[in-house]
Amino acid sequence: MRLTHTLLCVLTAFSFELGAATPTPFHGHSFAPSPSSDMQGKCTQKLQRRAWQNLSRAEKKAYLDAELCLMSLPTKTGLPAAVTRFDDLIKAHQMQAYWVHGDGWFLPFHRLLMSAHELLLRQECGYAGAQPYWEETVTVGKVSTCELLDPVYGFGGGGTGPGGCISDGPFKDYVLHTGPGEENTVQCIHRNVSDTNSWGSSQANVTECLQKPSFATAWPCLEKRPHWAGHNAIGGEVANPISSPGDPLFYLHHTWLDKLWWNWQALDLPARLEDIAGHTSSVKNPALPADYSFVNATLDDVLDMYGVVANATVRDVMDIRGERLCFEYVEYQPPAEENPKKTWWPWG
């Protein structure tokens, strides 16, 4: 396992501002069926990952209840400071943050982490749906008033309590044991919502990234623009590059980012299922000696999940329709106008 170092002075340089009780696990839901595969292990019946904005209230409530379940289950990894299953996922990110940001592992690792979160929700909390994503292009400039922050059928508001703690919504009482950054401190989920910081999620920025000709150019574009924007538009804990999974909104944001990567891959299949580039560590990694020789990422590199779920190679996660992953993205559908304007014709 990769080691982390408590060098908080480096944290600012690595920030997204540079683009950078007894558990009650089922909440009345039945166990979810697994995605179907054929005898060769090929994906045949894919989970449907849909935009949060397109889910019904019942579907939103089921997802939020499953997340609360994950927050109530005890840790299975025994990682330092982990108390709950939700904490296990945070730790898998925190303990290797400098290896999975600003490099070729960034997109593959986070694809695997989103799948791990989805798997735990389904297998351990009886969630019957798929991991949703936050369609961020439609909330640019209006994140603070979007339905994502609804106190009943959303994730609570923008952090109006002391210290920016969220004061409403289903997660207002959850106590984090990981973060901020590399620290392990008891803290609330806190936010500092900024409509201005959402600019990087604009359709123009997304389109520019999707037009990049190679992974070597597409990945930095996605990481520095849409990725940066989602984290910093919500602010608070999710804007901390080390401990950002402490806010449940992390998973909707990064699932959208993964969708963008898949949208880019799908423009040139199967060639882009093998297109990987970049190093295996951020250049800002404080654990590396000054004379460290950076290693290029390959399809055979192992992505470490620290015991949360089984490890996977980069190759394993390149195809969302493969043996390890089995899902597809459903495009966002804008709501129909409640009172569409009628076209007036002078002849009736």
Image: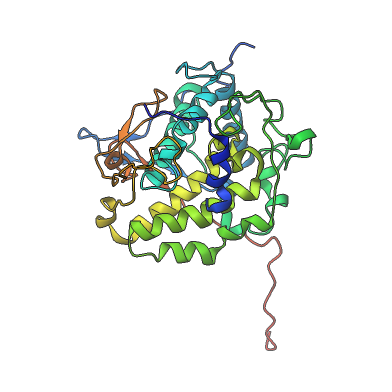
Q: Residue furthest top?
A: 22
Location of the C terminus by quadrant is bottom right
Residue at 58% from the left image edge and 47% from the top image edge: 231
Location of the N terminus by quadrant is top left
In this picture, residue 346 sits left or right of residue 80: right
Q: Is residue 143 above or below residue 337?
A: above
Q: Residue furthest front?
A: 291
In this view, the residue in front, 52 or 336, is: 52
In this view, the residue in front, 17 or 54, is: 17
Please tell me in which quadrant of the rendered image residue 308 appears: top left
Report whether residue 332 is seen: no
Q: Is residue 112 above or below residue 30?
A: below
Figure colour scheme = rainbow
Q: Position of residue 286 (x, y in %)?
A: 46, 38
Q: Position of residue 233 (x, y in %)?
A: 64, 50
Please tell me in which quadrant of the rendered image residue 287 appears: top left
Report whether residue 336 is seen: yes
Q: Is residue 135 above or below residue 105?
A: below
Q: Position of residue 301 (x, y in %)?
A: 28, 38
Q: Position of residue 328 (x, y in %)?
A: 40, 46
In this picture, residue 196 sits left or right of residue 230: right
Please tell me in which quadrant of the rendered image residue 294 appears: top left
In this view, the residue in front, 183 or 258, is: 183
Q: Residue furthest bottom?
A: 347
In this picture, residue 41 sits left or right of residue 164: left
In this view, the residue in front, 152 or 311, is: 311
Count of numbered labels shown in the rendering: 0
